[in-house]
Every structure is written in C-alpha cells, then in structure tokens.
Image (tube, rainbow, N blue to C red):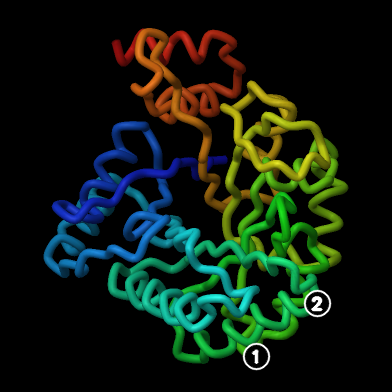
C-alpha cells in the first residue's frame, strides 16, 4: 500500500505553488499542505496563472496527484464569534476562490472559538457563515479540523462537528480533517485506533474524512493544550501514529506532518525542518530514536 505522506510547506509571492512543490520534493513527500499567505494576516499575493501551470507540470512529472494536496485557511478566520464576523466570512470566501484558481480541492478550516458565547451559539454562527459562503457551485471542500478544546474552541468532539455538518445546506461540500495531537489533547483515546475510527464512522462517517494531520503531542490525553511534538517523540508515540499511517481504512487519505522545527543547539533562533527525516522514518516503518540529532547534523 502506497502511503500518501507530506508536510506543511511554504508558498511565497515569487514562485508561489512552484516553491511549495519543490520543498515537498526535497522532503521525499508525495503530497503537502500550504497556506496561500501568512496564516496570521490578510496579506495575499495575486495568483499567477503561469506559475500555477508550471507547478502543475512539476507535480505531474513527479507523479504527485493534485487532489491529494491540502490548503489550510488562515488562523485569523473565526466564524464562531460576531467580532469581525463579516471579515472572517468574506476572507474565507476569498480563500475558497484562491483554492479554485490554484486547482486545489481541499481547504482545512479551524471551526472557530465562541469567546464566551457558548458552544450552541458558536455552532449557529459557524453554520450561518458556511451557508453564506458555500453553495452548489463551490468546487472546494471545506474540511473542518478536529480541535484540542483549547480555550473556547468549537470542534473539540465529533458531536460538535456533526452539528455543523448537519446545519450546512450543501453538507456534501463539508469534510473533516483529523489532527492526532488535537484528538489526544481533546480527550480521545487515539491509541485504540479501531475504536476511534468506529466512533468517527458512527458519528460522522469515514466517507467524510479528507485528510489527517499526523502529529505527536507534548501533552497527556485530555490536556486541551494543543502543543505538537515530533513524530514518535511525544505522548502518543511512534507505534500509535504509524497505525494511522498504515491502517487499511485510511488508505488513500493524505497524511500531513505539522511537527515542530528542530532548534540549533548553538543558536536557538535557528531552526531546521524535520520532515525529510520523519518521512523517511515513516516509510521505513521503524522508529529512529536519533532523529533529532540526525536532523541537526544534516543541516550543520
């Protein structure tokens, strides 16, 4: 079974999607995830059609299926709270258009934080926004991400996500992105993979699962903290995470690493991407306890 594995990569104004493809290839990946601009602000370059065409050619040459590539919506979108609600809705609409112009199929979205309004009202606000933004002509799936439950986050359990899906008129346009770190931190026992997948299938349906953020966690189950750890080096562990990579029910679903960069010992401000080594470890199906040192030595 070929695994579809990649990581977060950059997207810049100069090369745009070409830069993303090149970075993914340097890690030995066959998929990737990117933001179309900085996740913390509204600055966005205009999509260059010629650069997109070149990037698609590069994808084809390297046998990467564009339908496996994931776009992540910026963090500044919050559909659950009325503060800046119109801005969030309009910005999400623009992000969907950018995905369409790039030929991307999946846009991962943090559902939002209710900021004191309560889960019920927060969910209503999210549904209202999605119904405004999504219609039968939308060519992108909005993938609601499973959240850790930090602060007042919506989407900390399958029931909340199901409520949102059920409230959206064009619910066929809504998918789910699982995050293993978030599931652990929200209180799910993800070490029992069969039980978790069975519960997800019962509540939402495995046909709704579009991608998985395959992250370890620095925190114990139910901590609601959302702090990612490198693959196999956290509370979840290699043996559990590799099951999500190889499970037959998850075949064909893109798995994306969002694990932390490694700090340089002599200069903590200098960091190195771990993805080339984590992907190699995953492909070999064997835990490398020297991963961190190997990464530091490689980039020195």
Q: Which residue is pictured at 48% across the width and 63% down the height?
A: 76
Q: Circle 2 sits on which residue?
A: 120
Relative to 232, 10 lies left or right: left
Q: Which residue is pictured at 22% across the width and 55% down the height?
A: 16
Measured as percent of width and height from the top left, residue 164 is found at 71, 77
Measured as percent of width and height from the top left, residue 244 is found at 68, 40
Relative to 225, 87 lies left or right: left
Bin the neighbour count of mark 2 within 10 Å (Cα to Cα): few under 14, some 14-19, many 20 and up: few
Task: Name the N-terminal-most of marks 2 and 1.
Answer: 2
Q: Nearer the viewer, residue 136 or 220?
A: 220
Q: How many marks?
A: 2
Image position of 237 with respect to 207: above or below: above
Image position of 82 with respect to 18: above or below: below
Q: Quadrant of the N terminus?
A: top right
**Image quadrant assignment for residue 241:** top right
Measured as percent of width and height from the top left, residue 295 is found at 41, 15
Callout 1 secondary element: loop
Q: Circle 1 sits on which residue?
A: 169
Q: Which residue is pictured at 57% across the width and 27% down the height?
A: 230
Query: Which numbered marker is on residue 118?
Result: none
Measured as percent of width and height from the top left, residue 140 is found at 46, 75
């Amino acid at each position: 079974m070929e695994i579809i594995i990649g990581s977060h990569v950059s997207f810049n104004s100069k090369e745009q999607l070409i830069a993303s493809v090149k970075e993914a290839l340097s890690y030995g990946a066959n998929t990737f995830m990117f933001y179309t601009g900085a996740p913390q602000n509204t600055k966005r370059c205009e999509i260059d059609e010629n650069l997109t065409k070149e990037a698609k050619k590069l994808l084809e040459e390297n046998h990467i299926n564009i339908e496996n590539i994931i776009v992540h919506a910026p963090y500044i979108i919050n559909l659950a709270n009325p503060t800046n609600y119109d801005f969030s809705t309009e910005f999400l609409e623009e992000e969907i258009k950018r995905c369409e112009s790039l030929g991307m199929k999946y846009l991962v979205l943090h559902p939002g934080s209710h900021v004191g309004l309560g889960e019920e009202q927060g969910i209503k606000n999210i549904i209202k926004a999605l119904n405004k933004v999504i219609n039968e002509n939308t060519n992108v799936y909005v993938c609601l991400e499973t959240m850790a439950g930090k602060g007042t986050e919506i989407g900390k359990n399958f029931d909340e996500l199901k409520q949102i899906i059920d409230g959206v008129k064009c619910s066929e346009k809504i998918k789910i992105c699982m995050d293993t770190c978030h599931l652990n931190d929200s209180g799910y026992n993800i070490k029992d993979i069969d039980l978790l997948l069975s519960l997800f299938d019962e509540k939402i349906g495995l046909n709704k699962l579009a991608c998985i953020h395959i992250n370890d966690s620095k925190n114990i189950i139910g901590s609601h903290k959302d702090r990612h750890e490198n693959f196999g080096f956290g509370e979840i562990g290699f043996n559990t995470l590799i099951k999500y990579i190889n499970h037959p029910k998850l075949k064909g679903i893109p798995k994306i690493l969002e694990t932390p960069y490694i700090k340089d010992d002599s200069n903590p401000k200098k960091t190195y991407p771990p993805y080339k080594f984590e992907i190699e470890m995953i492909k070999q199906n064997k835990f490398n306890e020297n991963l961190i040192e190997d990464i530091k030595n490689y980039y020195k």
